């Protein structure tokens, strides 16, 4: 009797146990199916959340840097922020979408908020006495203030032309610099690796005024040409000067990344035509605001004409919002001196420094990849020697991997191949301006790729 009851008892237990195991298995599958969620969060000694999967020796160093970042930069959110995520999750770092700075702007709250009433910004016109008649005075004032404060561009004796992103200004500049009555389109060149959009933007509309002329390093044709100088360069982050250096050359400087978070500010840029963009300065790509500093009055007039014919000016709402954001950046720099908090550039510089540190640790521990090396230099803005820390990673696949983009895609990491930048497929460009979550997952994923 005792024997029978113990058998029934253990059978019942077995059934309950089996049911519990099945339910927990189903719940786990459902939960992990949601974009890489890992519910096994742990707290480390500083109270920062880290995932259980991160606790292996390979990623220990990366985690250490992350803890530093969390304690210096975190917004105080105590939820589990860092997790390896599912290996099946595709990490797309193809575009340079600058969402990385969102945390700063959230922290600043209303300091960058504007309210525009229904009756405001109605006219096409802003200041008809200005060559660029659609330029908002407030915006122009903040552009000059920020350049003066940062020391990255001469604004005196320059006309400001505002554009719908610096992309529109790039086309306006090509239009303005091209000879208007030449039988042949003028060649537009840039040293490779060059920003992948330049060739397609130049040739998309098959203009009779200008055409893409390829790599400036090997350009040998006689006659006038336009050379685009991107410094620091997208994609490889190096500081650049013009390459062709012939008397008939016209220079267009794209200084989208000449800001203290990316590169040491060595001196104020003093060129004929310089482009800047809010996208990379403050991260507000969606506002679609860029500006050109133009020495020559006739060139400024032609650029203005191009934008007039193209979009009849530039959104006033965006210019007013851009003015407010630029003012918040300048204020944050001035307030920092009076101990009122971290400036935008200090925040963004720390953030980029931390990302580069994590990335170099992972790449250095692998034989598969290599990164460009940069020399530290004195930065007039930070008043100290700093390292360049570009917005993009220009990664090379070493050894037998001939197509780095394809290789990383097989690991569910989407990058942009070197072929789009006029060089070998052994290189890829990877955005470092993405969200913390995507960046962390990228570094984790890269650390797990140890062999072909
Ligand atoms: C070098 C360079 N110039 C211009 C742009 C375009 O900027 P915008 O968003 O102002 O059109 C980019 C964007 O990635 C860039 O990298």
Image (spheres, rainbow, N blue to C red):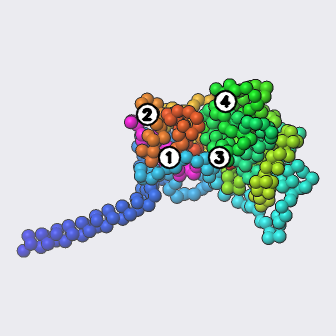
Mark 1 and mark 2: Cα distance apart in space: 16 Å
Prevailing secondary structure of the magenta residues: helix
The disc, 4 or 3, on the residue closer to the chain's N-terminal end is 3
Residue 414 circle label: 1
* Viewer-closest of 413 and 50: 413
Residue linked to disc 3: 204
Judged from this view, the residue extending furthest toward the right is 129
Is residue 21 within the magenta segment?
Answer: no
Mark 4 and mark 3: Cα distance apart in space: 20 Å
Mark 4 and mark 2: Cα distance apart in space: 28 Å
The disc, 3 or 2, on the residue closer to the chain's N-terminal end is 3
In this rendering, the answer to whether 317 lies above or below 89 is below
The disc, 4 or 2, on the residue closer to the chain's N-terminal end is 4
Residue linked to disc 4: 216
Q: How many other residues sit within 10 Å of disc 4, few (<14), some (14-19) or many (≥20)? A: many
Mark closer to the observer (4, 2): 4
Mark 1 and mark 4: Cα distance apart in space: 28 Å
Residue linked to disc 2: 401
What are the residue bounds of the magenta stretch?
Answer: 434-452
Does residue 95 appear in this view? yes
* Viewer-closest of 150 and 423: 423
Left-right relation of 449 to 164: left
């Amino acid at each position: 009797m005792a024997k029978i009851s113990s058998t029934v008892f253990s059978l019942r237990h077995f059934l309950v146990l089996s049911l519990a195991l099945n339910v927990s298995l189903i719940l786990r599958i459902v939960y992990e199916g949601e974009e890489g969620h890992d519910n096994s969060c742990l707290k480390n000694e500083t109270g920062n959340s880290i995932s259980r999967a991160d606790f292996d020796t390979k990623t220990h160093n990366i985690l250490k840097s992350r803890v530093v970042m969390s304690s210096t930069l975190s917004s105080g959110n105590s939820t589990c922020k860092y997790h390896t995520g599912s290996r099946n999750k595709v990490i797309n770092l193809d575009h340079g979408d600058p969402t990385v700075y969102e945390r700063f702007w959230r922290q600043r709250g209303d300091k960058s908020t504007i309210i525009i009433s229904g009756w405001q910004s109605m006219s096409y016109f802003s200041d008809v006495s200005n060559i660029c008649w659609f330029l908002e005075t407030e915006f122009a004032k903040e552009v000059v203030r920020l350049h003066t404060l940062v020391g990255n561009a001469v604004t005196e004796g320059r006309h400001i032309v505002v554009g719908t992103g610096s992309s529109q200004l790039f086309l306006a500049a090509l239009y303005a610099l091209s000879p208007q009555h030449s039988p042949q389109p003028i060649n537009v060149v840039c040293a490779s690796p060059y920003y992948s959009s330049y060739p397609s933007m130049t040739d998309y509309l098959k203009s009779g005024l200008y055409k893409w002329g390829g790599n400036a390093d090997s350009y040998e044709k006689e006659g006038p040409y336009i050379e685009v100088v991107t410094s620091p360069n997208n994609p490889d982050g190096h500081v650049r000067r013009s390459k062709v250096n012939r008397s008939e050359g016209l220079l267009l400087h794209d200084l989208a990344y000449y800001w203290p978070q990316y590169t040491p500010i060595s001196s104020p840029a003093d060129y004929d035509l310089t482009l800047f963009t809010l996208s990379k300065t403050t991260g507000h790509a969606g506002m679609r605001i860029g500006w050109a500093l133009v020495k020559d009055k006739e060139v400024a007039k032609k650029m203005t004409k191009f934008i007039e014919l193209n979009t009849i000016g530039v959104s006033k709402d965006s210019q007013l919002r851009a003015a407010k954001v630029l003012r918040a950046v300048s204020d944050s720099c001035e307030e920092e001196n009076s101990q009122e908090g971290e400036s935008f550039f200090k925040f963004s510089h720390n953030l980029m420094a931390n990302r580069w540190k994590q990335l170099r640790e992972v790449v250095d521990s692998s034989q598969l990849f290599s990164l460009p090396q940069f020399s530290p230099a004195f930065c007039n803005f930070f008043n100290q020697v700093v390292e360049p820390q570009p917005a993009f990673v220009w990664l090379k696949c070493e050894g037998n991997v001939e197509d780095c983009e394809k290789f990383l895609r097989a690991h569910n990491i989407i990058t942009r191949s070197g072929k789009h930048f006029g060089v070998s497929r052994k290189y890829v460009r990877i955005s470092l301006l993405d969200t913390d979550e995507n960046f962390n997952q990228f570094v984790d994923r890269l650390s797990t790729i140890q062999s072909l």
